[in-house]
Image (cartoon, rainbow, N blue to C red):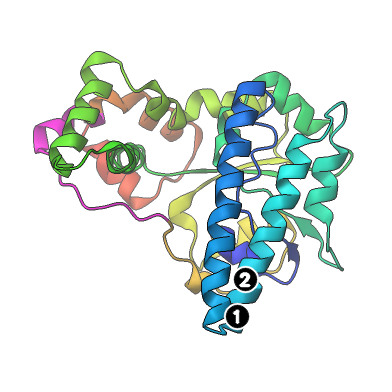
Amino acid sequence: MYRYLHDHAACHVRSVKECHYFSKFNPKKLMRQLKVLDRLVVQYEARLIEVEAADDIIRILSLSRRIDDTKALIMALSAERSDDSAYLEYLQAGRMDETVLLDVTPAYALLEPTEIARISALPIRVKLQYLMRDPLERLLSHVRMVAKRSMKEGQDFLLTCQDILQRVLYKQEEAHIVIRGDYKSNISRFASVFDHSQFQIGFSENLQDGPKFDAMCSYWGIEAISPSQIKRAHVGLAAPFPEGLRRDTLEFLKAQYDFVADNFAELPENWRKNRELLA
């Protein structure tokens, strides 16, 4: 989705996908994020040397932009925060006649009410888009991602995935995985601050041609063009889970399926199929 909007003529988008501005007011979290960005700059600069040696003009321009944008974001995050002018200046730098500015930071879904209120107080017209993915697919994908990042040399990927999932289901551990998919709580916090004109809820499964995708674009205030170029980002490694474990995961997620079914008239096909398994 980020790439679709990045390439849309009506959108002004920096090359750093996730700003993390509103999710990093805590000093410790901010310092960790700044270290992440500093490491990215070092990596980009090393790659830039390689592509310059290969005289790859397109990649030279792309990496140069990433370096500049990442350094600019570091400055914005490090700036004094009595207001949010540095953040807005970062988003708008280089803007021509584009009508939409973009900050795609999934972690904003976990913001506290005070942080959400700060977004609502920005001196620009704010519109938020919250996309939901099928709860089962989302949780299993998150488990695979955590397993991939935490595995040590010699560990079995499938067994690591199953161990993480069992900790989630039976030991109430790995809470960070669960809260990302707590649609009921996340939506409720934003809906208490923003009305429907500024807070739209949709399904990631609808990011394809059709009236639902057109409605999303209309909400953003941009012309809908074919989203055929949208590709899944960060596709995880395959990891089949035992049927019994999948069933327990569905039961664990029943409240999320019920909440969405009670509040949305039409569910995507994969949501319906998984919910029917709970009957």
Q: Is residue 76 or residue 106 the one in the foreground?
A: 76
The reply to whether dot 2 and dot 1 touch (C-beta < 8 Å) is yes
Crowd around label 1: few <14 · some 14–19 · many ≥20 (10 Å): few
Verify whether residue 239 appears in magenta. Answer: yes
Res 279 quadrant in image: top left
Q: Residue at 83% across / 57% down in the picture?
A: 93
Q: Residue at 59% across / 24% down in the picture?
A: 188
Disc 2 marks a residue whose amino acid type is Ser
Q: CA distance from mark 2 to mark 1?
A: 6 Å
Image: 174 above or below 67: above
Residue 120 placement, left or right of 274 = right
The answer to whether any part of residue 125 appears in the image is no
Q: Residue at 80% across / 50% down in the picture?
A: 90
Verify whether residue 196 appears in magenta. Answer: no
The image shows residue 77 at horizontal and vertical percentages of 73, 38
Q: Which mark is residue 58?
A: 1
- Look at the image and give the residue range highlighted in magenta: 234-250
* Location of mark 2 (residue): 62
Residue 254 placement, left or right of 224 = left
Q: Dot 2 lies on which element?
A: helix
